[in-house]
Image (tube, rainbow, N blue to C red):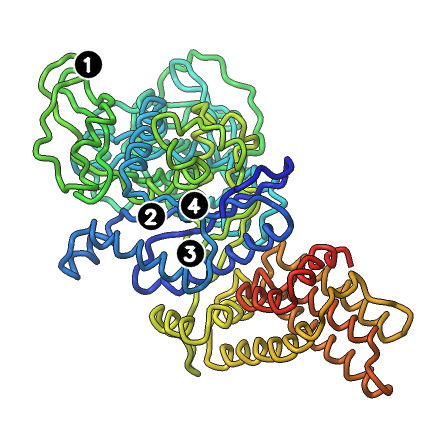
Amino acid sequence: MGTEADPPEGNESFVYADFVAPMRGDELDCARRFVIADTYARFRRDRGDAVLFAPAIGTFGEEIVLEAARRGISPHDLADSLVDRLRQRCDLLGVSCDWTRSVVTSQPEHCRRAQRIFLELFERGLVYRREPPGDDRPWLLQRAAFAESCDRGLDELPGWTADAIEAQRRVLGRIEGVEIDAVLLGGGQVPVFTPYADSIGDSTFIAISPHHPEVQTVASPSDLEQLRNDPSPVSMAQTGMQAAIPGVDGLLPVVVTPSVDARFGPTLCLGIPDRDDTDREIAARLVTRPGLPFRTTRTSSKPRSAARFPLPDRPVSRIGEWGVPVPIVHCDGCGPLSADVEEASGGSKSQTGASETDSCRCPGCGEPAKRDRQVLDGRFDSMWAWLAIPVPPDDRGSSSLAHSELNRWLPARQAVWSAADAEQFLDERFASRAMSELGILPGLDPPEPFAGATLCGAVGGDEHGGVGSAEELDELAAREGPDVVRLTILHAASAPKPASWTTDSFRHSQRFLGELRDYAEPRLSSRELAPPLEIDGSARLRRRLSAWCRVAEVKVSASLEQLKMHRATYDLMLFLKRIRDFEERCVDAGELTPLDRDAVVVALMQLVRLASPCVPHIAAELEAIAGTEASRSLAAASDL
């Protein structure tokens, strides 16, 4: 919970979970992620790491507005109540968050941070608004610029689970193919993509996305206007541009169509009607135009391996009153300009509702202008939340984007994410690359925010009964204790798989913890002196118990490190069975000697230590029962 003392270099672990202000319907999913992430954070602390584990809570978004309207309260009051409920649930479940480092996206300092980041991106052309501009058109974050880097980076992340990597690849939607250089009529050369490397010679046209950066070099304003007014299922506009492709006879007409984005992203592609239904529809609408003299030397380019990503640019703003105001001023003479962040935050819609007036003075020419009427979308605010957690609260001012603590804690050692939110996870990876490009995270190389990542499946209902709501989970934790709930959550299934918590599963956890307490208490409390640090191996049964201890140490530690919590809890249960089996065999052989009793205590102390991240409250009770001297032997027992 924070960092009271500086640990040795390299022993720092930032654990990040997908914390949101949970809405009704996904609270059980959130609880599962909390417990899994907390178990890992406790495991790293037990290994001597300084651990930063704090929530970043997203409180903006249209769903907050709709739920607040349903309840008849303000979005601000709803957000506060959701944060309070989240904290209460974390306390009930024994989640060891450092709340002093928490981030709530509707807090003023985070609003200003989001605005500063937006302006940095705006100045670099990474956020834009499509033409023609208008209050109803959202601002968009360019993602194509970082898609290839995010895809390539997945091969360099050994700390990620296979499920997490596969989820990222699905969202990216990589399309394999080739690209070849096309020479435009009148000069210029552009790469053109196709997934059909064996059919380049059958191309009949070239298509360009209306969102490609070079679209205005091949399409006129009237072409783009025609495209916007085309009601066809596959809208397109034939430009006057033509181009030459090696291996294709004659010149190919160039059309602009948004169908390129859906298939390959904002790029240029070859139209091959024989291989693609969309291309066939476009080709049927082409108007034959007389060929023009082609004076430019043709390229000798050869096809080369390439990939494209049909990933649309992310809308990052919307019309509304619950959100961070977009810090842009619109002037008839100067166009869109950056607004002063402090001034934009002063009338923050996130705190007080819509600003009293949108009128202002242009920061460029001083003439009357208007503030942007949109607010930043909740997903945009959450994209940068992980970046705020490492910064101490007192330093989250204007200098926090380049704080020295970022270099200390980033990249995060482990992130636990919802399998349903893989796209938001991808956006956080986009964010790190954007910040690196802006020079804000120069020390993050490669620019990955999370060295390890685990996806967490959803919690579903069960026809045999069980916990069906977060309120039931809270009542169970209050009645039976947090460790029963934690053990049930961890033992139910591997993290990526869906889980259901039945009545039987909770009873199973209750039985195990009851057996552990009933068996361990009298054996740990009966000693006046600390047990030896290792098991005496002069007898065959004690040697076998010592071997079981070593196996349990390796298996449980490896499972906790890899967040295979279901395997860790299974092996803990098996370990207790092995200890009891040893004692029974000794009794059956004649008697339980003092050396045998010592062996049981040593093994139990190791079991308690290994179980501590999963069931910390019962583990702490048993450590206290063992006494101060016995507790100090725990660290040494880890060498078994």
Which residue is identified by label 4? 276
Which residue is identified by label 1? 364
Q: At numbered mark 1, what does the secondary structure look like: helix, strand or loop?
A: loop
Q: At numbered mark 3, what does the secondary structure look like: helix, strand or loop?
A: helix
- Dot 3 and dot 4 residues touching (CB under 8 Å): no
Q: Which mark is residue 420?
A: 3
Q: Position of residue 200 (x, y in %)?
A: 51, 34
Residue at image location 24% in from the left, 50% down from the top: 62
Q: At numbered mark 4, what does the secondary structure look like: helix, strand or loop?
A: loop
Q: Quadrant of residue 325?
A: top left
The answer for how far apart the CA atoms under marks 2 and 3 are is 16 Å
The answer for how far apart the CA atoms under marks 1 and 4 are is 49 Å
| Residue type for callout 4 | Asp
Q: At numbered mark 2, what does the secondary structure look like: helix, strand or loop?
A: loop
| Residue type for callout 3 | Ala
The answer for how far apart the CA atoms under marks 2 and 1 are is 34 Å
Viewer-nearest of discs 2 and 3: 2
Q: Observer-nearest residue: 243 or 612?
A: 612
